[in-house]
Image (spheres, helix red, strand yellow):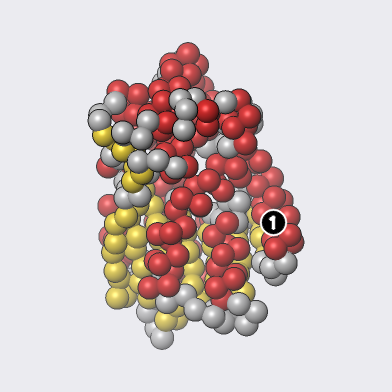
Amino acid sequence: MPPGKAYDGNRMESMGMGRSSRSEGYVLRGGRAGAERLHLLNRVKWPTTEPLLRVAGLRAGMSCLDVGCGSGDVTLKMAVLVGAEGSAVGIDRDQSILHLARQEAEKQGLPVTFRTLDTEELAEESAYDLVFARYLLSHLPRPQRAVEAMVRAARPGGRLVFEDVFFPGHVCYPSNAAFDRFVELYQAVARMKEGGDAAIGVRLLGMALEAGLEEVRVGLVVPTFREGEGKLVTQVTMEHIREAVVGAGLASDPEVDSIVGELGRLADDDRTLMSMAPTFQVWGLKAGA
């Protein structure tokens, strides 16, 4: 594609990259802008999430819970996979993004339930056959509490499935200073604004074992791209953390502009390779079946 063609103002807006509001206290933007970023992320990530859910045991007739569901992309796909005999529920703390998720469920004619709920407020016990969380735990100051709440929500013998990032493991070839700065800034602002850990992926196994899961399995995926919208993820994400980064004094608006522009140039160059954050996949069974 010609340089710059995919990155004009209209395209930036369509990806939710205009300077708009974000959820209070959250590093990444919420609402419609956040939903557009999450739609992009899911389109790129679903080819590795779907096989994970299947190998973890997702099948027709199951009751499923998607924790920190965001725009509901995975929740809706889970609803299709479990069919009319099953059920799918998504919870998230962002009311505005859940409103959009409900609209999409209605549009697709899927009987999905979305509830506004913080993860630590999840009080259900032994209610679901499969509980899933993707890219949630890295944002939480007390991720082990969230894991324990999810385990409680699963039925004895139920499946728990987690996916989360190991941000330092990003790949960019040739190496690029703007890309490295993006990786640095994301990790720094996640720690400062939320008390999160953008390298939590390597900790998931230990967290699952500490929560008492059995038959725990581990995988690692590093979606890497020469071309296509997978290469947009870093640029879009950098724009979405702009307010948090600038507000925390980690970088200026002009520096963010420079990084976003350079990430767009890299994405437009089919001689470069860019990865999403390496993602650890951990799944296991709740004891007591």
The foreground one among 248 and 86 is: 86
* Image height of 117 relative to 190, above or below: below
The foreground one among 163 and 239 is: 239
**Which residue corresponds to mark 1?**
104
Q: Residue furthest left?
A: 174
Going 46% across and 37% down the picture, which residue do you hit? 232
Q: Is residue 215 visible?
A: yes
Amino acid of disc 1: Glu
Residue 271 image position (x, y, % from top left):
31, 33
Image side of residue 212 versus residue 154, left or right: left
Residue 288 falls in image quadrant: bottom left
Residue 40 image position (x, y, % from top left):
53, 46
Image side of residue 51 versus residue 204, left or right: right
The foreground one among 2 and 141 is: 2
Going 37% across and 30% down the picture, which residue do you hit? 269
Going 28% across and 64% down the picture, which residue do you hit? 218
Image side of residue 11 versus residue 46, left or right: right
